[in-house]
Amino acid sequence: MYPFAVPTPARWDCPEFRDHHLDLTDGALAAADEAAALAHLEVCMDCACFDVRVRRAMLVVRNLPPVPASPDLHGRIMARLKESAALVLLVDAPEHAGGERLVAMLPAS
Amino acid sequence: MQSAVVSRRIAPAVPALAPLPPLSHREQLAALDDGALVAAFSSGDDRAFETLVLRYQARLLNFICRTIGDRERGEDLVQEVFIRVHRHAHRFDPTKKFSTWIYTIASNLAKNELRNRSRNPLVLFQALQQNWEDEDRPLQFEDHQSRPDDMYRRRYLREKVEDAITRLPEHHRQVFVLRELEGKPYEEIAVITGCNLGTVKSRLNRARAAFAEIIEPALV
């Protein structure tokens, strides 16, 4: 017999466990809550499977390769920026902007 | 006194370092943070804006494509994001994070795209057709050093993951992509999506559970 009470983790049910699952996987639960979550995992097969399923899925999604860009994407962005800047100049100050020159710079559409 | 003599004796033994070549303008810009680049652009340095484009184009493409599920349209929207940033750079509040601002613009454009698409069945059809055409293309993005069955498996898994992401509800998907693929902190996601922190976490929790359930059969 211990002369003092050993703290036992609070008991969590499934909805409580799943509500806190994000914080559990982020390692953001307070120590007592984390103990309650882990204690629930010991006794609930459904939530243990859920935990593994989510962790495994996150591992896969975080390793997804980036979306490949078209080789000319940067060039197209810069061309559109130039075009858009020229149009803004024409609209804002056509009398100062040398309108004919700017129009000549624009690609024929 | 004696130590000064010693150090004078030792000093010539250390080879003098050749002076470093001066940094090019491009290198100087690349070393600046986003806020300094916006300030440089606002003072008339167009190269500063190009540095921002280089810094963000791939990240934004990733975010937008994963959100709307269409690469070609995603590239158009990335261009649109930069045009808006270029036009409204003077409105950027330098006390805030530039990445939050640009992602907010991207997020709004992606949301509009999804909204318009749901109203216009023709656009949806074109997006689906685009995906069919993608299927017919040769393997382009795999590691060609791998064995064919590994390549097939990777491609299969990538497609399943991408498909599972597009099957999440829109407001869950955005939060999911920002967190799990872009690695954004919750506070920044809250600003980008215009939700409070609790909503962001609750949506992410649901999105992760839903995603895990959808992808599960592909992982066994």
Image (cartoon, coloured by chain):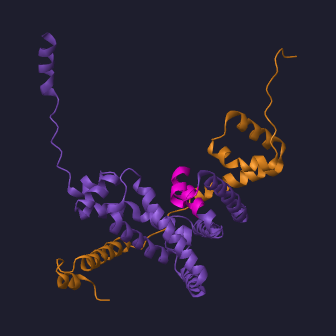
Chain colours: A orange, B purple
The vertical placement of A42 against B41, above or below, is above
Residue B120 sits in which quadrant?
bottom right
Residue A79 horizontal/vertical position (percent): 30, 76
Query: From the viewer's perspective, is residue B158 above or below residue B5?
Result: below
Question: Is residue B181 a member of the stretch shown in magenta?
Answer: yes
Q: Closest to the observer: A85 or A77? A: A85
Query: Residue B42 sits in which quadrant?
Result: bottom left
* Residue drawn 33% across the image and 67% down it: B86
Residue range (magenta): B174-195
* Side (left or right) of A48 relative to A74: right
Question: Could you say where residue B191 lies in the image, as x and y percent from the top left?
Answer: 51, 56
- Residues B100 and A8: in front is B100
Residue drawn at 33 percent across, 69 percent down: B87
* Residue pictured at 65% horizontal, 45% vertical: A23
Is B147 displayed left or right of A34 in the figure? Answer: left
Secondary structure mostly seen in the magenta stretch? helix
As drawn, is B52 to the left or to the right of B217?
A: left
Classify residue B153 as left or right of residue A86: right
Position of the N terminus of chain B by quadrant: top left
Rendering coords of residue A56 (x, y %): 67, 54
Which quadrant: the C terminus of chain B?
A: bottom right
Which x, y percent locates residue B171?
Answer: 61, 65
